[in-house]
Amino acid sequence: MNKDIVFNKIEFLSLYKKLYAFLRQDWDLTKVRQLKSILLKYIDSSRNIDNNTNVIYHLILEMRTAIIAIDEIGLKQPTVCAILLFRPILNDNSIMKSVTKLFGEEVNTILNGLITVNKISDKPTAVESDNYIKLLLSIAEDMRVVFIMIAQQLQLMRDAKDKEMQHKVSLSVESIYLYAPLSHRLGLYKIKSELEDLSLKYTDRDTYDMIARKLNETKRSRDKYINDFIQPVIEILDRTNLQYDIKGRTKSIHSINNKLKKQQIDFEKIYDLFAIRIILDSPQELEKAHCWQVYSIITDMYQPNPKRLKDWLSIPKSNGYESLHITVMGPSSKWVEVQIRTRRMDEIAERGLAAHWKYKGVKGESTLDNWISSLRESIEDKDSNIAEKLGDFKLDLYDEEIFVFTPKGELKKLPKGASVLDFAFSIHTKLGSTCVSGRVNGKNVPIKHVLKSGDQVEIHTSPNQFCKQDWLNFVRTSKARTKIRQLLKEEASKQVDIAKETLSRRMKNRKIDLEDPQLMQLIKKLKYKTVTDFYADIASEKLDVNWVIDQYVEMGNRESAQKELFASTSADQFVLKETIKEESTSGDELIIDQNLTGVDYKLAKCCNPIFGDDIFGFVSTQGIKIHRINCPNANDLFSRFGYRVIRARWSGISSGSYISTLRVIGNDQINIVSNLISIISKENGIQLRSISIDSDDGLFQGSISVSLANTSMLEQLMKKLRAVKGVKSVTRIN
C-alpha cells in the first residue's frame, strides 16, 4: 500500500478523534453520530482507491481548518460542523435538505454562506476581485464565514512551503493585501502576524532568514535582559493580592523588517524587539482598577515615556482590543514596552472578535456592528462599480483610530486621517451633504481639516451646499465615499435628463430628426465611453448643444454621400486596403498572467530583474512592470495594490541582456580592484558596465554594474568574486 495513503489515514484518524472530543463537549451523541455517518458516506462515495485517497486528502484539509478555527480563533460547534459538512454537501447537495433538522439553523446559515462563496470561481491571477466579492458576500451573510476563510487561508499558507514559487507568491499577495489586514481588523493579531511572516518567508527568504538568525543569536542576551527587568517587578507584585502572569514577547519578523526599512537602521540598533506582558486574573468589575494599580507600580520603578502611553482601557479599539501600553526606561537605559491587561482582555487580543462575543455587554460590540452595517451599505450600492466597492472595503481595514466628540460629548471613532467631512457623514448623510465648514475645539476650520484624537467637533451646514467631486479626494471613511458617490450620481442623473430634453428640443426647433443609431455613432466618434458621460458634458456645458447638432448633421450628410459613391462603383473597381498588423515591442521570454506571451512589459528599475529571477507582474499606469519577488518595494505593492499583481514567469531560453548591480565589501589591498575587473573581463557573456569604489580606514566598498544573460551567470560571477583574497562579501543590490 502507498505510504502516503497510510499517512493520510493516520492523520485523518488523529484529527477525527480531536474533533469528535470537541463536538461532544456541547453536543449530544446522536447529533455527533449523524455527522460521522455523513462523513463516512462521503468517504465511501467512491470505491476507486485514488479517488478515495483524494477524498480523504480534502477532508484532512477541512479538518486542519477546523482545528485552527477551534484552537486559534475559538469558534464553536456549529461553525466546526459547517466546515466538516462543506465537502460532503458539494459532493451530494441533497444533504442540505436535512441540515437544519439534524444540526440546527446556525449550521444551515453558515453552510449557505460557504456555498455562496464557493459558487464564485477563482481566477488564475494572484488577487482577483472575485476573492474580495466572496468576502463581502460572506460578511453580509454571517461573520463566521469570514473567520472560516481566514482559517482556511492560514492553513493554505502553512501547507505552501513545498509548493512552486508562483503558488506561494499568489497566496502571499492575498495574505498581505487582504487577509492580514482583515485579521487585524477582527482582532486576530496572532494569525495576522503569522500570515505576514509566512508571506515574507515565501517572497524574500534571505531577509526572513537574516532576521530569524539575528533573533536566535540575540535570544540569550534578550532573555537575560527580560529576566533582569521583571524580577524587581515580580517582587513588588507578589506583595499585593493580585493574581498575575508575566512574560516577554518578541515582535514578529515581518514587523521587525518593516521597522528596518522605515527607519533605515541596522538590526542591532532596534531597541524594542520585545515587549513585557502582564496578564491579571481580575473580576470584570475590578479590571480597570487592577490594571491602573500595576501601571502605578511599573512607573514608580521605571521612568515612563509620557508620549508612548496608549490607553485602550478607557476607549477600546473598534475590534474590541483592550490593553494599557506604556514605554519605560529599563536597565542599561533601554526603552521597554509594557502591556497590562486582564485574562479576558488577553483572550480577546489573541482570538479577536470571536472571543469578544462571548462577553456580553462589553464595549466595542456596537462599533463592529456599525462597521458591518457601513460595509453592507457599500455592497448594496448598485451604482458603485467593483473597484469602488473593493476600495471601500480595503479602506475600512485601517490600522489606527482616533476618537472625537460631538458638541454633546458623544464619542465617535474614525480612522486616522479623517476629516471634518468624514465626521459629518458619520453622523448623518444630510449633515454631510450640506456641510460647509466645522468648528473644532472652538475654532472655525474648513471641511478638509484633519481631525485628531480628543477634538470636539461641531458641523456648520447650508441649504445651498451640494456634494462636489473633489470631496472624494480627501474623505477617509468608506461611508463618506459611498454616500458622496451616490449623491453625485443622483445629481448627474438629473442633469443627464435635462441635457437629453435640451438636445431633443433644439433638434425639433431646427426640424432635424433624431435617430438613435446615428447619435450613438457620433458619441463613439467623440470617444465617449458611455452615453451618460456624453450628456453629462452637455449638462456641464463642456459640449455646446448647437455644435453637437452641427456634427450630427455633417455626419449624416457624409454617410449619404458614401452610400451614393458605393452605389455607383462597380465590384471590379473596389479595392480593399490591407490592414497593417502592429508588431508587439516585447519578446516572448516572459509568460504573463497565465499563458500570455508577446505582451508589452518593462523591467522595473527598482530591482532590475534578470532572466531566471522569481518575478511577478504589476499593472501600472505606464503598463505592465516586471519586479523580482524580493524587490524592496514588493511588500508595499502587495499590501497596497494587491489587485494589480499578476503572475509572470520566464519561458524558453534567455536571448537578451540584463543589467545587475553588485555591492562588494573587502579589505583595501593593492590590486584588489584590478583583480575584480580582471575576473569580470574573463567571463564569457558578461560585460562590465560601471564600477564605483570608496575606501575608508582600511576597508573598501563599492558597486559594480554588469550586463549578462541570466541568474546562473550572475551566481557564478558572485561565487568567483567572493573567492578573491581580501573580499569580505558580495551581494546583489538590484
Image (cartoon, grey):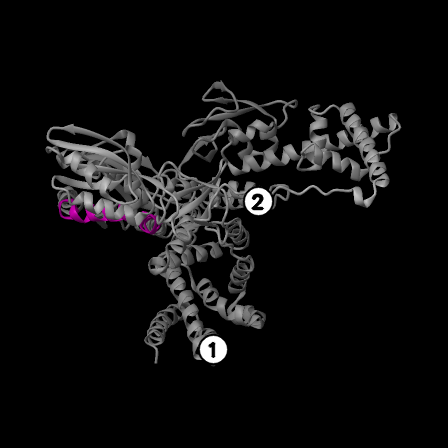
Residue 338 in which image quadrant: top left
Give the residue displayed 36% in from the left and 36% down from the top: 606
Q: Amino acid at mark 1?
A: Ser
Give the side of residue 9 with respect to residue 573, left or right: left
Task: Give me the C-alpha separation between circle 1 and circle 2.
Answer: 42 Å
Given residues 191 and 664, the one toward you in this image is 664
Q: Nearer the viewer, mark 1 or mark 2?
A: 2
Image quadrant for the N terminus?
Answer: bottom left
Q: Which residues are magenta?
A: 196-222
Give coordinates of residue 601: x percent, y percent.
Answer: 47, 41
Given residues 119 and 201, the one toward you in this image is 201
Q: Name the disc covering residue 57, or none.
A: none
| Residue that protrudes farthest toward the front in the picture | 572
Give the side of residue 702 with respect to residue 190, left or right: left
Kind of element beneath mark 2: helix
Whether residue 183 can be seen here? no
Give the residue displayed 10% in from the left and 31% down from the top: 698
Given residues 718 and 428, the one toward you in this image is 718
Q: Which residue is mark 1?
A: 37
Which mark is first along the chain, 2 or 1?
Answer: 1
Disc 1 packing (10 Å; few <14; some 14–19; many ≥20): few
Give coordinates of residue 412: x percent, y percent.
Answer: 47, 34
In the rendered view, would you say 508 is above or below 60?
A: above
Give coordinates of residue 652: x percent, y percent.
Answer: 41, 53
Whether residue 308 can be seen here? yes
Q: Name the disc covering residue 386, or none.
A: 2
Instruction: From the image, give the main secondary structure of the stretch colored magenta.
Output: helix
In the rendered view, would you say 282 is above or below 55?
A: above
